Image: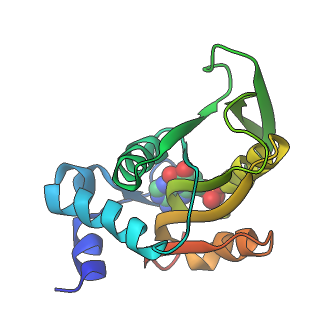
């Protein structure tokens, strides 16, 4: 089996979660598998091989698991990009649009130094709104988002292209059709 077939087989799809029409791509089954976790983290490391980063940033919560493991593999430190109200020190906050309403993500104001090269990680990219907010935060800190990696791409939602349009290199390991 190819790596992408193996990853795909380890992801569980929950129809109509959290609401009708959404096919929720549940990675808990992937994380539970030693092979699945290793293939995901090593796959992202390989996709960006040759690129030099200073830090990995992960988006709460699934981006912490993959991004934390990847930072360890790459020998780098880790920046948590968290949901509003969770970080204890001085923060920057960035709003992004949801289908109904807005949400926001936050980062510590001293999470990176100007000019540092950051690799942004999450489990899945759909519309790209969450990743775009993460990129905006890092850029407001003066960081350079030198790559954005996701295990899963939902290409019909256009998120990967949206992030590429910001001049950021995007790498994904597998694709699923639909929402
Ligand atoms: P977006 O901002 O639209 O790119 O959505 C990406 C974020 O929402 C990621 O943190 C994903 O974990 C989560 N997400 C969006 N759509 C799905 C889906 N179909 N299955 C699982 N997670 C999803």
Q: Is residue 47 above or below residue 30?
A: below
Query: Residue 24, image x and y in percent?
Result: 43, 58
Q: Is residue 20 left or right of residue 142?
A: left
**Quarter that holds the C terminus:** bottom right
In the image: residue 7, left or right of residue 20: left
| Front residue of this view, candidates 115 and 36 | 115
The percent position of residue 33, horizontal first and vertical second, equals 16, 55
**Left or right of 93: which side holds 20?**
left
Please provide percent x and percent y for residue 90.
75, 18
Q: Quadrant of the N terminus?
A: bottom left
Which quarter of the rendered image does ligand 1 occupy? Answer: bottom right
Name which residue lies at 70% across and 77% down. 161
Rendering quarter of residue 129: bottom right
Q: Choose between 125 and 137: the one closer to the eye.
A: 137
Which quadrant holds residue 3? bottom left
Residue 59 visible somewhere in the drawing: yes
Position above or below: 142 against 36: above
Numbered label tally: 0
Image point (45%, 51%), residue name: 17
Check the image and tell me how it is coloured.
Answer: rainbow
Q: Position of residue 53 (x, y in %)?
A: 57, 58
Taking the view exactly as shown, the residue that stands out farthest to the bottom is 1
Left or right placement of residue 43 versus residue 167 in this view: left
């Amino acid at each position: 089996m190819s790596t992408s077939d193996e990853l795909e087989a380890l992801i569980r799809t929950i129809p109509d979660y959290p609401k009708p029409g959404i096919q929720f791509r549940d990675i808990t089954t992937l994380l539970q598998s030693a092979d699945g976790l290793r293939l995901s983290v090593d796959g992202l490391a390989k996709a960006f091989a040759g690129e030099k980063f200073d830090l990995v940033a992960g988006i709460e919560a699934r981006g912490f698991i993959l991004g934390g493991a990847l930072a360890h593999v790459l020998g780098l430190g880790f920046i948590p990009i968290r949901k509003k109200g969770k970080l204890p020190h001085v923060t920057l906050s960035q709003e992004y649009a949801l289908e109904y309403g807005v949400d926001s993500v936050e980062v510590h104001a001293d999470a990176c130094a100007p000019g540092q090269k950051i690799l942004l990680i999450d489990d899945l990219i759909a519309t790209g709104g969450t990743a775009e907010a993460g990129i905006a935060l890092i850029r407001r800190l003066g960081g350079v988002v030198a790559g954005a990696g996701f295990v899963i791409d939902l290409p019909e939602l256009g998120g990967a292209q949206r992030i590429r349009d910001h001049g950021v290199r995007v790498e994904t390991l597998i694709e699923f059709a639909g929402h």
